Image (cartoon, rainbow, N blue to C red):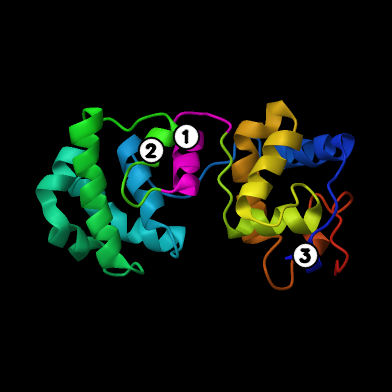
Amino acid sequence: MPGIMASQLDYPALRAVFARFAEAEPAPRGELEHTNAFTLLVAVALSAQATDKGVNRATRGLFALADTPERMLALGEEGVIEHIRTIGLYRNKARNVIRLSQRLIEVYGGEVPSSRAALMTLPGVGRKTANVVLNMWFGLPAQAVDTHIFRVGNRSGIAPGRDETAVERAIEDNVPAEYQQRAHHWLILHGRYICVARRPKCAICPIRDWCRYEDKE
């Protein structure tokens, strides 16, 4: 990563970058389908090493049957497997979905907790998954850094860092407060569709003027 790590953009540049993102997409949304906090939590946990489209195809039938921890537990591990076989690591993920459902019932009264520490006690839920739930469902300015955001942060200078935690902190420390809650969505969508891993689409990039990536095409 040091080879593509740009220097941190200054505050005026960051304001300009996120103003441009907001102008282009005022209300960015995540692409994982869900109906409540529990289905969002499960969908995000299933999305590790899988695409959102693949997860959505698998969870439509699953969530039609089991949209609460109680219903998921009643469906059972084999029942979950039947729906998510097309997702990578499906057996381990099904086991975690059942275990986290059981813990939600036993410890949190069947409700998804709104604290990062509590979320991270659930099987299969790490910091990134917890931050997505906090951001998308509870509206908190939590920054879930995936491979797309890691790439964009380092290439552009928006949030450079040698690991995901450093990039997360760079976003929290440097991005203007009014843009923090939606920063996760803007950055992930930018990385998914424009600042792609190979041959980034610099010609149509809305923040090209401020980006510090040296190999613009």
23 or 18: nearer the eye? 18
Rendering coords of residue 165 (x, y %) = 61, 48
Q: Quadrant of residue 215?
A: bottom right
Q: How many marks?
A: 3
- Can residue 168 be seen? yes
In magenta stretch: residue 133: yes
Q: Is residue 17 left or right of residue 69?
A: right
Q: Residue at horizontal 41%, vertical 50%?
A: 44
Of callouts 1 and 3, which one flags the residue occurring earlier in the amino acid sequence?
Answer: 3
Which callout, 1 or 2, points to the residue nearer the camera? 2
Q: CA distance from mark 3 to mark 2?
A: 32 Å
The amino acid pointed to by label 3 is Pro
Give whichever of discs 1 and 2 has the lower sequence position: 2
Q: Main secondary structure of the magenta part?
A: helix
Left or right: residue 177 compared with residue 60: right
- Using the image, determine if residue 70 lies above or below residue 211: above
Q: Where does the magenta region start and end?
A: 126-141
| Residue 102 spot, x, y in % from top left | 19, 42
- Residue where numbered disc 2 is placed: 119
Q: Secondary structure at mark 2?
A: helix
The residue drawn where x is 24% and y is 36% is 104
- Identify which residue is drawn at 25% across, 66% down: 91
> Do the residues under discs 1 and 2 have CB atoms within 8 angstroms?
yes
- Determine the secondary structure under disc 3: helix
